[in-house]
Image: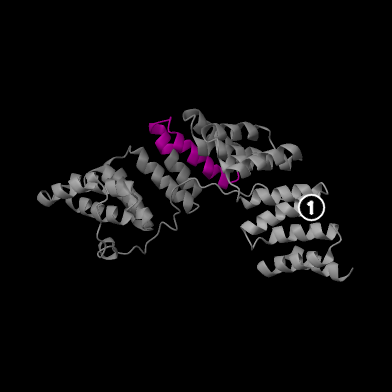
C-alpha cells in the first residue's frame, strides 16, 4: 500500500535561520548606501521632522529604527541603527537591536559580536545571552548554547523561552527525556506558550505516548485553527491505528486548510488500507491536484488502480511518479512488477 506520511512536520521555532557565526560580512553602510527609507506612518513622519533639527540625537534614530522594524523595513532600520551606534555605543539595548537586524541581513558574525559587546557592558543581560544561545543552536554548537541558557536561568529562573530553547538543544542531542522536561517547564512558566505545547506533542507522538493528545489539545486551546496541532494529532491516531479518529482529525484539518496535501494523502492511504479503492483514488487525486509533483500520491493512486485491475491507469501513475521524482525506487519496482504480469 502507499506509505503513510506521518510525523513529517518541521516546526519553526525561531524567526531567523542563521547560516553561520563566522566572518564574511559586508560593510553595512556600503551594502545599503543606495537605500532610501520611505515614511509609512504618522509616527515616522514626526520622527523625520524632529531629526531634521536634531540629527545627532541617537535616541530619535533608535525610535525610528524600531518604527521601521514594526513595518518590517529592516534595511531602513539597520541604516538607522548604524547611525545610532556611531552616535552612542554605550547602551546595551542598542547592541541587542542591531544584533537582531544583522540577523535579518544575514550578517551573523556582526550579530554575534554585537551581543558579546552588550554582555561586556551588561554582564547580566539575559536577552543577549538567549540570543547568543540561539546563534549557537543554529550552528549546532549545542553545549555552548546550553551554557548561555544556564547563565540566563541563574539570573532569572522563570524565563520560559530559555527552557524552550534548552529543550530544542536536548532534542538535537537525542536526549528526548530532558527535551520533554524542559519544554514542559516552558509551558508551566508560560501557559500560552503555543510552540512549546506543539513541540512536546511531537516528542510524545514519536513515542506513541497518549500524552501527545493533551499537548495537542492545549495547542488547539491557544489556536483552534492550528494546522500543525491537528496534523500531529491525526498522525498520532494514525500511528496507533485508530483509523476513525485519524480520519475525523484530518477532515477537521481540511476544513481549516483544504489544500493541505499531506492530510489528503494520509486519508488516501487509510482508505487504501481499508480496500476502499474509489475513495482512496479521490484523496490521492486531491493531493496531486494540489501538488502535481507529489510522487507518493501518484504511486498511491497507481496502487489503487492495480487493485481495481486497471493496469493502464496504474502504469501511467507509476510513470508519473518516476518522472517527477527520478530515482523513486517504489515506482520503478512497481513498473517492473506490472511488466512481469
Residue found 79% across the figure and 64% down from its top = 314
Q: Residue 85: horizontal and vertical position, in percent?
A: 22, 51
How many discs mark residues in the rendered view? 1
Residue at coordinates 28% horizontally, 61% vertically from top-left?
Answer: 28
Image quadrant occupied by the N terminus: bottom right
**226 vs 313, nearest the viewer:** 313
Q: Which residue is mark 1?
A: 278
Position of residue 330 measured from the top left corner of the image (x, y, whole percent):
76, 63
Left/right of residue 142 with respect to residue 214 in the rendered view: left
**Residue depicted at 76% across the width and 51% down the height:** 280
Q: Is residue 273 left or right of residue 123?
A: right
State the extent of the magenta-drawn residues as a range. Answer: 150-174
Q: Position of residue 290 (x, y in %)?
A: 62, 57
Q: Main secondary structure of the magenta part?
A: helix
Quadrant in the picture for residue 241: top right
Q: Does residue 31 appear in the picture of this structure?
A: yes
Amino acid at each position: 500500500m502507499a506509505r503513510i506520511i506521518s510525523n513529517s512536520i518541521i516546526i519553526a521555532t525561531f524567526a531567523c535561520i542563521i547560516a553561520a557565526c563566522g566572518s564574511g560580512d559586508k560593510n553595512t553602510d556600503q551594502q545599503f548606501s543606495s537605500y532610501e527609507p520611505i515614511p509609512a506612518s504618522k509616527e515616522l513622519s514626526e520622527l523625520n521632522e524632529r531629526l531634521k533639527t536634531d540629527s545627532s540625537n541617537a535616541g530619535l534614530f533608535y525610535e525610528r529604527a524600531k518604527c521601521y522594524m514594526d513595518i518590517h523595513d529592516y534595511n531602513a532600520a539597520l541604516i538607522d541603527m548604524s547611525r545610532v551606534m556611531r552616535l552612542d555605543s554605550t547602551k546595551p539595548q542598542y547592541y541587542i537591536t542591531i544584533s537582531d537586524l544583522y540577523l535579518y541581513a544575514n550578517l551573523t558574525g556582526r550579530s554575534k559580536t554585537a551581543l558579546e559587546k552588550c554582555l561586556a557592558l551588561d554582564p547580566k543581560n539575559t536577552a543577549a545571552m538567549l540570543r547568543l544561545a540561539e546563534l549557537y543552536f543554529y550552528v549546532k554548537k549545542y553545549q555552548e548554547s546550553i551554557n548561555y541558557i544556564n547563565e540566563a536561568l541563574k539570573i532569572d529562573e522563570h524565563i520560559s523561552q530559555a527552557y524552550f530553547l534548552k529543550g530544542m538543544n536536548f532534542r538535537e542531542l537525542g536526549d528526548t527525556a530532558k527535551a520533554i522536561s524542559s519544554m514542559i517547564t516552558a509551558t508551566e512558566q508560560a501557559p500560552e506558550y503555543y510552540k512549546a505545547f506543539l513541540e512536546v506533542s511531537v516528542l510524545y507522538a514519536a513515542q506513541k505516548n497518549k500524552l501527545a493528545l493533551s499537548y495537542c489539545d492545549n495547542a488547539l486551546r491557544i489556536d483552534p485553527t492550528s494546522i500543525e496541532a491537528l496534523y500531529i494529532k491525526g498522525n498520532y491516531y494514525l500511528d496507533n491505528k485508530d483509523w476513525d479518529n485519524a480520519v475525523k482529525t484530518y477532515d477537521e484539518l481540511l476544513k481549516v486548510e483544504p489544500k493541505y496535501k499531506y492530510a489528503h494523502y494520509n486519508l488516501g492511504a487509510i482508505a487504501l488500507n481499508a480496500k476502499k479503492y474509489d475513495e482512496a483514488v479521490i484523496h490521492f487525486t486531491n493531493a496531486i491536484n494540489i501538488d502535481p509533483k507529489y510522487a507518493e500520491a501518484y504511486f498511491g493512486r497507481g496502487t489503487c488502480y492495480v487493485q481495481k485491475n486497471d493496469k493502464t491507469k496504474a502504469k501511467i501513475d507509476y510513470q508519473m511518479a518516476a518522472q517527477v521524482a527520478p530515482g523513486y525506487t517504489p515506482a520503478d519496482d512497481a513498473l517492473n512488477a506490472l511488466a512481469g504480469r
